[in-house]
Every structure is written in C-alpha cells, then in structure tokens.
Amino acid sequence: MLDKELLQLAIEAREKSYSPYSGFRVGAALVGKSGKIYLGCNVENAAYTPTNCAERTAIFKAVSEGEREFTAIAIVGGKGDELADLCAPCGVCRQVLAEFCDADFRIILGTPENIRVYTLAELLPLSFGKADLK
Ligand code: THU
C-alpha cells in the first residue's frame, strides 16, 4: 500500500476519535507483516489519565488479534475538523511501538499533500527495550 493511501486510512480512522475533552482528534493506520491493516483513534476519558492515543489503540487491537510484527504506521491529527500539518506520536506511543517494531519501522506523518516519513530509530534514539533486560 502506498504511503498516501495509508495516510488516507488514518484520516478515516480519525473520524471515530472520541475526544470530547481536548477536541484534538487523532487517527492511525498500522500495517502488520501479514498485510493486515489495523485502524485506531484516540479514546479520551473524563478522568483524563485513562485516555488512549490513536497509535496505541491500533497496536493493542493488532496484538490482541495475534499480530506482533509491523512494517509501518500512518498518523494524522488536529483540532476539530482541521488536519494539522504534522502530528508526531507522543513519547509513550513511541515506546509502545518500540516493543513490537524494528528500528527501520516506518512512521508516516503529515498530510496526503505533504508526506513526511521517519524511522522508529529516528524518533526514538537510544531507546530502552527488551534487549536491555537480558
Ligand atoms: N494523542 C494521540 O492520540 N496520539 C499522540 O501521539 C498524541 C496525542 C491524543 C491524546 C489526547 O486524546 C489528545 O490527542 C490530546 O493530547
């Protein structure tokens, strides 16, 4: 699937965002090595802390369905109906991605008109992971 098409799926996933407190709506589309695509949106909570980001929704959906290896994720976000030029994953989501994704895992950001691609290693350098616990 093309990066642009994956971003478009993230935009569709964003439609489901439950974000009555921040009004900031995020969507993600995650590609498993099986080829299956998992969509996610942010799900907020009145107690604020239990809020789940779109990226983690997608990855937890995938892992709970048996997929543990991934090649790419597209992420979009913005206030209300506005799509931001760039919505980078938060630190917690980068760490969760690092649990299941290799250094060359692709993170597709931006908009369909201006796509920016990073690797996980670029967005989470010097990370702590399962190898450190050996
Ligand atoms: N959010 C995400 O879904 N992903 C991120 O990586 C950044 C933040 C959500 C969480 C919260 O619902 C809203 O955006 C504002 O922080």
Image: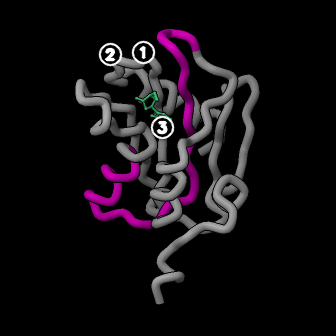
1 or 3: tag closer to the N-terminus: 1
Q: x, y percentage for residue 88?
A: 61, 38
Q: Nearer the viewer, mark 1 or mark 3?
A: 1
Q: Identify the residue at the far bottom of this view.
A: 134
* Disc 3 residue type (three-letter): Ala
The residue where tag 3 is placed is 28
Residue 59 appears left or right of 28: left
**Residue that mark 1 sits on:** 23
Residue kind at label 2, given as amino acid type:
Pro
Check if mark 1's residue and mark 2's residue have beta carbons within 8 Å.
Answer: yes
- Of the residues shown, which amino acid type is indicated by label 1? Gly
For disc 2, the marked residue is 20
Asked whether the residues under the numbered discs 3 and 2 touch, taking CB atoms below 8 Å apart as contact, a structural biologist would say no
Q: Which mark is residue 82?
A: none
Front of the two marks 3 and 2: 2
Q: Is residue 88 above or below residue 65?
A: above
Q: Tell me if residue 59 is in the magenta stretch.
A: yes
Question: Distance from label 1 to label 3 (Cα)?
Answer: 17 Å
Which stretch appears magenta? Answer: 58-82
Residue found 56% across the figure and 30% down from its top: 76
Which quadrant of the figure has residue 1? top right
Q: Residue at x 50, y 32 (%)?
A: 10
Q: Position of residue 15 (x, y in %)?
A: 40, 20
Gap in angstroms between the C-alphas marked 3 and 2:
18 Å
The residue under the point 26% across, 28% down is 45
Residue 110 percent coordinates (x, y): 68, 30
- How many labels sit on residues? 3
Does label 3 or label 2 sit earlier along the sequence?
Answer: 2
Question: Residue 119 occupies which quadrant of the picture?
Answer: bottom right
Q: Residues within 10 Å of mark 3 (few under 14, many from 20)?
A: many
